Amino acid sequence: MKCNPKHLALLVPAVATALLLAACATNPVTGKSDFVLMSEEQEISLGRRYSSEIVKQMPVYEDPQLADLVQRVGEQLASHSHRPDLYYRFTVLDSTTVNAFALPGGYIYITRGMLAYLNSEAELAAVLGHEIGHVTARHSVRQQSTSTMTDLLGAVISVSTGIQGIDSLTNMAGTAIVRGYGREHELEADRLGAEYLAKSGYDPDAMLEVVGVLKNQETFEVAVAKQEGRTPNVYHGLFSTHPDNDARFKEVVSAARKYKTGTTTVIGRERFLHALDGLTFGDSAREGVVRGNRYFHSDLDFALTFPQGWRIDNKASKIVAVPKANDGLVQMTLADLNKRITPRAFMQQRMGLRNLRQGKSFSSGGLEGYSAIADGKTPWGTRPVRYVVVYRGSHAYIFAGAAKNRSNPMQYDAAILATANSFHPLGSAERALASGQRLDIIRAGHGTRYADLARKSPIANYPEQRLRLLNDQYPDGEPATRQLLKVVR
């Protein structure tokens, strides 16, 4: 939106026009006026405030060597950006999500889930360069300013600071900032990122390679979801607005080659892969580890066994298992105890369950508990739900399970009870299993094949395909002799 005093004067009273004119700012990239509702100082302050909220939701991944690499590459790109005076902070988050995003003012994040699928320093630079582009073009500020304009006009008489609506960015942190902006802003970030790559000595074509990695993951996820009869969990963040064979995207990347400063370009494949050696892959010990149909949590010191063949989804607040037919579920959640009441009373008072049926005491490994059936909300509507509450220390472990079939609602009751019965403290041999999986960097020998590596891999589901995705050789590539490979141990 262009900042035009004549147009603004037609829309609002004189006092509002004065406030809106004060919001005109020069875009650091284009040199043209933008409509924004905050100064650069306010932008930086906002980023600082929300950065603390981000790390509460997704803690920082503790690996000083990897953190130094990400910061070094990011700073090199930022030094060639349109806002080199900002102090950029690049942070690796301990999350399996494949994502990268930027907060206002230079706070940029990349997940270990994203890093695991990159295969060179140039690809890392492509991801960071794209996010730097969002910062330098002030996309979060521009989008926030436009989206809150209507609210501002409606309440302008009561505004004392002229920047009301700034707190609406809290909602953006979970939408545009984390999931990506509109296509035009994303293309602008692509163009800027490619320019910063070229000026920093990296090959701008690395952006094309990253898009290829993400598109392969999307193709795989759609195929798996169809096979499992569920909705695909398709990625909606970085580069997600690009259709296949995106001509405009290829044009902006190609145009950046004119900024190349030397005859050679940095790829940095081997040193980057060595930096990933030991990176946590998949579930971390902090969030619990799934191995086959078993679940281990080192911090809380317990293990579970789910029904054989059920798909296990380890979420932030619960762990859920679903049979192949997708017609049932069992989940476990955790709650703190704050009153010395019986497990039955916990169900009634804390969980608000009414009309308990078939209630009886429950024992798992000598731990006190209670089991009962009560009607509850499920993905298929109200159904009889099997509940089990087990006390251990100051926590209540809550199991709940149900079946879709109205005529046979207790179809999976035995499996649900067996899962609850399997709850027990970790044994000495199980503690090693609770430590999580990590990337191991190896060099392929003559005749190394992904099928052979998959047979030895601890990856529970689709190991051969996932190894190919990790090494950017999906769907049917094979390693070259002496090629560095990522495997999982």
Image (cartoon, grey):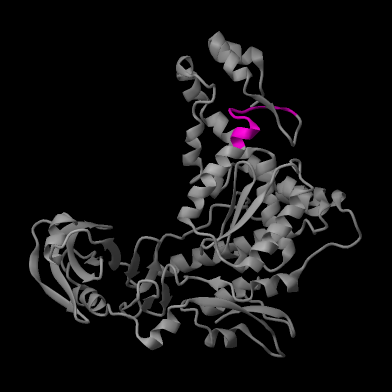
Asked whether, in this view, residue 111 is left or right of residue 158, the answer is right
Residue 113 located within the stretch drawn in magenta:
no
Q: What residue appears at the point 67 percent right and 71 percent down from the top-left corner?
A: 275
The answer to whether residue 16 is visible is yes
Q: Between 382 and 227, which is closer to the camera in this rendering?
A: 382
**For this rendering, which residue is in front, 16 or 338?**
338
**Whole-percent x, y for residue 302 in the image:** 33, 76
In this rendering, is residue 371 above or below 238? below
Q: Position of residue 98 (x, y in %)?
A: 55, 61
Q: Is residue 312 above or below residue 8?
A: below
* Quarter in which the C terminus is drawn: bottom right
Residue at 71% x, 69% y: name it: 272
The residue at 65%/45% (across/down) is: 106
Say which quadrant the N terminus sits in.
Answer: top right
Left or right? Give the position of 175 relative to 81.
Answer: left
Res. 251 visible in picture: no
Residue farthest top in this picture: 14
- The residue located at (90%, 57%) in the rendering is 262
Magenta segment boundaries in residue numbering: 32-43
Residue 22: name its quadrant: top right
The image shows residue 243, relative to residue 148, as above or below, that is below
Taking depth in this image into account, of 445 and 409 the one nearest to the observer is 445
